[in-house]
Image (cartoon, coloured by chain):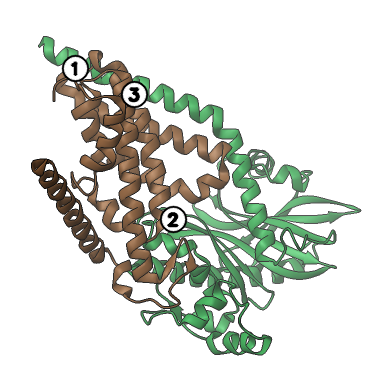
Chain colours: A brown, B green
Amino acid sequence: MALSKKTNSQLLFNGILTENPIFRLALSMCPAVGISTSVMNGILLGIAVLFVQVFSSCTISAIKNFIHPRIRIPTYTLTIATWVTVIDLVLAAYVPEAYKAMGIFVKLIVAFAIITMRLEMFAAKNPVVSSFWDAVGMGLGFLFGMVTLGFIRELLGSGTLLGYDVLGTRPLLFFVLPAAGFFTVGFMMAVFNSMELFFKRMKQKR
Amino acid sequence: MKQIIRITLGLTLSCLAAGLVMGGVFILTAKAKQHNEHMAVQETMLSLLGYGKNNPAPSNLHLYQIYRYVIDDGGEKFLGYMIPLKKGESIRYGLIVITLEGSFKISHEFGISPQQALEPADRETALKAVLKPPTSFTFADEIIIAKLDGKRLAYLLPGEFQGFKTFIKVMLAMDPSFKVLGMEVLEHEEDPGLGGDIERDYFENQFANKSFERLKNLNVTKEPLPDEYRKYLEGKTGAFTREEIEKIRGKYKDQDIYALTGATISSQAVTDGVKGMARRFAYRIDVLDRTVASRGLPVAF
């Protein structure tokens, strides 16, 4: 991808809908399937990814001219690992309440495909400001994806939302298991694809 | 060749920069993190004893720490307990050394206060003064004995065992008859949404009220957790009458632990870990109590 010509708002929108990491790019499927068992899990992991993505993208974008092309992937991993560690330590020291809830999610992030992919595809080729907005878009897209999956799975699997009893029963217990994560992701991908088709047809009609 | 040098240099510098950032942040945050951890442990201990914001701990509740060390004296192993001893009005720590068979070997007195004993470095200095080389020692674990009005109220045992991924750190509370009062997961790295749920109330609270006899052969069951029991475990008992709550408590008192959906290994690991901790502790405290009584030591606990 060459230098992006998109405006900041386009970059933001791009990550949330057009190139949603989970439903359009099918990246970071492991957490999407494993962790999205409840809305709260989705929110916490989504926020953690948002922060790491923004910090990592800005760092790589700022130092992109100094990175030797042959060692760019190890450098990305190192950058992500550094930010994950820094966020983990800072949360543990100054926001213990948030750390208690988010600690285990933050530690998972080092190996997330979506972050490395955005560094390679975008941050390594674009200026810091565009990279920032792309990272925010992708982070929010991931957050949106996780919350949507969490919403469907928590409601159908546990009959609750954010821990509050909504249905009074557990309609499909199967939805809390990882296998159901794949079904839900597949279903959401179908929704996104049909939305795309719908908008394309609308455009053609005009 | 030039390429190789550039790549090596680039990687080394990147690692160095990352290391410096991480190291710097670690130094800046270490103290605050340690303080938070200490406060969290204190809070957990009190909450396991039933005290909290709405029900503050009474002033005559005392917590006494006992530190266990493994002592190596020329290849022979001994157990060393650093215990609080009464000295007039104040409390000073001492060391009692017991053989692996459970008989008394020797005791020493230190001048260090309970506050100083909380610091691992101070304890080490005190121990080094009496256990001179070639005798060596390693810290094993710590137990806390809670006393209210001069009577033993509970034992608090911090412990750790292997989980599905890495170690799981817990705090177990037992009454003097070794019945479980409560269990709290302090730290773990199990998968969120699956094994990570070991820290949820509906899992942790299943251990409460299990007698020592029941604990010995406690197992996990893959049956689904009944709704009424789940509500009871989560403290959502608003809709139940007092009799109903008592009925639920009685009904599930001797029940095996209901495994978490999709995380049987984590559930089994915690159950086995808690079982092991309780069994070992019951044996050790019995030996310690008997040894202390036989020597007539003026212990505070």
Q: Is residue B289 depicted above or below A117 in this figure?
A: below
Marked residue nearer the N-terminal end (1 or 2):
2
**Alpha carbon of mark 1 to alpha carbon of mark 2: how far?**
40 Å
Name the kind of residue labelled 1 in the image.
His
- Residue at the far front: name it: A206
Residue A58 is labelled as 3
Q: Please say if B161 is above or below A80.
A: below
Tell me where residue A149 appears, x and y as whole percent.
Answer: 31, 57
Of all chains, the one bearing label 3 is: A
| Above or below A101: residue B287 | below
Viewed as shown, does residue A72 lie left or right of B202?
left
Q: Which residue is mark 2?
A: A40
- Are tags 1 and 2 found on a single chain? yes
Q: Residues within 10 Å of mark 3 (few under 14, many from 20)?
A: many
- Label 1 with label 3: CB-CB less than 8 Å: no
Q: Which mark is residue A68?
A: 1
Please tell me whether mark 1 sits on a helix, a strand or a loop. Answer: loop
Q: Is residue B290 left or right of residue B204?
A: right
* Residue drawn at x 35%, y 56% as measured from the top left: B165
Q: Do the residues marked 3 and 2 share a common chain? A: yes
Q: Nearer the viewer, mark 1 or mark 2?
A: 2
Measure the alpha-carbon separation of dots 3 and 2: 27 Å
Provide the secondary structure element on which disc 3 rests: helix
In percent of the image, x 45 and y 60: which residue is there?
A: B161
Residue B24 left/right relative to B265: right
- Give the amino acid type for the residue marked by disc 2 in the picture: Met
At 23% from the left and 25% from the top, the residue drawn is A6
Determine the image quadrant of residue B100. Answer: bottom right
Q: Does any portion of residue B298 appear in the rendered image?
A: no
**Whole-percent x and y of residue A30?**
25, 52
Pointer 3 or 2: first along the chain: 2
